Amino acid sequence: MRGFHRQKMVLIWAMCALLVLLAACSSSGGSTSSPSPTNPPSGTSAPTAAARSEYVIKYMVPGGDGKLKRSDETEIGKVIKDKFNIVIEYVPYAGNWDEKTNMMLAAKDYPEILWIQGNINYKKYQQAGALVALDDYLPQLTNFQNRWKEQIPFWRGLANDKKLYKWEFGNFDSSTLGAGNDIWVRIDALAKQGYPQLHSEDDWVKFLKQAMKDFPTAPDGSKTIGMTAPFGEAYGMAGIAGILYEKGGKTTGVGGNEGVLFSSAANKFEDYFKNQDVVDSFKFFNRLYREGILDPESFTDKVPQVREKTNSGRSISSWYSGTHNNNQIKSSGRPDQQFIMMPIQSNRQIQNKEPRLMMELDIYPFYSMVITKNAKDPKRIVELLDFFASEEGQILMQNGIEGKHYTVQNGVRVPTDFYKTETKNPDNKTGLSGGNWFIFGQDKRAGKDGKPYSFGYDPQLRDELGQTPETMNAIQKLGWKSSVEWWQKNGKGAKVGLIGNIKLDPTSELNPVYQKMVDLRVKNTPKLIMAKSEAEFDQIYKDLLAEYEKLNPQKVIDKFNEMYQAELNSAKK
């Protein structure tokens, strides 16, 4: 589960930064204003930092590129320096971050503030006495306590002394829901069949069979592929082969790719291999395989191979992974072969009239932040943390400076022309691109005006920035107002952030059983997909299930539910 979870979380982090950057290209319809970069945002008091010495805080950036050295090189950073006389010094780190955090703890050589990716390492730091308890500063954390009032009991519950040592960033709810990772499909194939509303397994099989007849050969003369998939990746057979489970109304993708799924409908963990939606997913791919639609090379293809097949016009569709590049496809003289995302649900999910359950990560352990005992002045860090928890701070963090980066028109924030021009440059000095300040508690939920703070989460604006004229035309021909309309109309949010806390102890006597459960499923999934008939599929699954039951998997499922209840009870204390 951790490999797939990490891959998704890193992707979400990269997308988050990209949305901020893309927001620069939107149409503001407002004036272009360029006040001094050091002007404070509207509503702030005059700078109060003059009497304080400059406080430089080193922050190690996992995967950082090292282009930005200090926060006061940016416009937002100058505002923060004027207001607090605090500067963040960014130190990139390219190695394995889990290993690095453990090494720093062992040597007691950790920076003043630290991003800890997950609760396992967080607990190590807390139990080692390496962290500053925020409880001592609660009178200074009024905004912080108001913004994170639902999360704080869970954060406290992780500590053995029930004190508050951490915060998180990137938490989101249904207000930022976009399209799910479903099926990417070529717009020429849609146009040829009159822009059908593809939704069910049956819809997709019928459509792709016809599309392969309509477009029998690729530009290079090779036979057209109906659907590609990166099943050769570590998360392929382990994760996305069975992932129809996240397309319905019971479970989301938060469960990961190991032995359990979390059913939001039943409020409990369930067995992955026995889940009906997972079985339906295997059957769907078996059907695609038997129909000659699924690329036989998908079992070994990784992302680069899928990317080549979509960009070259060899494939009509691709599963889950949007590896194509529409601009590259267009520049190669094939604008009609660009891709858009369309939904899928299993026939069973549609028959049951299930919504599309979309995860809301109200708790986000992967993005945990702490102040360590090596902090020279925790009180000043806390002051900055509380500022960013305010409405003013979130707007500055995610929209920039009023009058320079955005204006307010009819109560709505819109980016300025100056902002659009500046942030097109990847080396811009706004302080917005890349989320330089997100570590102080970026809140991706809606603000007081009911809208997400980041411009990039507006559906129409996002399409203006991310779609080409050709893909936007296809979206409109489908009758959609935006590329995410189907998911927003049919999606239903589910708060599942706590589920990421539930991990089986590697030293547990159940862990070997758990690994065998996962291995049996992953190893044998190709056999199921390549079955020659429905009857053969059913027999293979029956035989595998009999072998699987010998492991007594229910003991593991029971343990996960026991840990889940313990987490719930811990937060209530």
Image: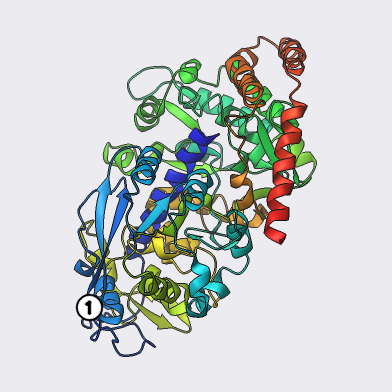
Report which residue position mark 1 lands on.
53
Identity of the residue drawn at 39% across and 62% down: 438
What kind of element bears circle 1? loop
Q: Can residue 291 be seen in this view?
A: no
Q: What residue type is labelled 1?
A: Ser
Identity of the residue drawn at 56% across and 39% down: 182
Q: Is residue 543 above or below residue 175?
A: above
Q: In this view, does 393 lie above or below 203?
A: below
Of residues 163 and 232, the one nearer the viewer is 163
Identity of the residue drawn at 57% across and 75% down: 146
Q: Quadrant of the C terminus?
A: bottom right
Q: In which quarter of the image is the N terminus?
A: top right
| Coloring basis for residues | rainbow
Q: In this view, does 135 lie above or below 187?
A: below
Percent of width and height locating residue 87? 25, 69
Q: Can residue 269 be seen in this view?
A: yes
Percent of width and height locating residue 382? 42, 72
Percent of width and height locating residue 142? 52, 79
Percent of width and height locating residue 500? 59, 45
Identity of the residue drawn at 60% across and 43% down: 254
Mark 1 surroundings within 10 Å by alpha-carbon count, few (fewer than 14), some (14 through 19), many (20 or more) = few
Q: Dividing the picture into quarters, in which one does residue 303 lie? A: top left
Q: Is residue 296 left or right of residue 30?
A: right
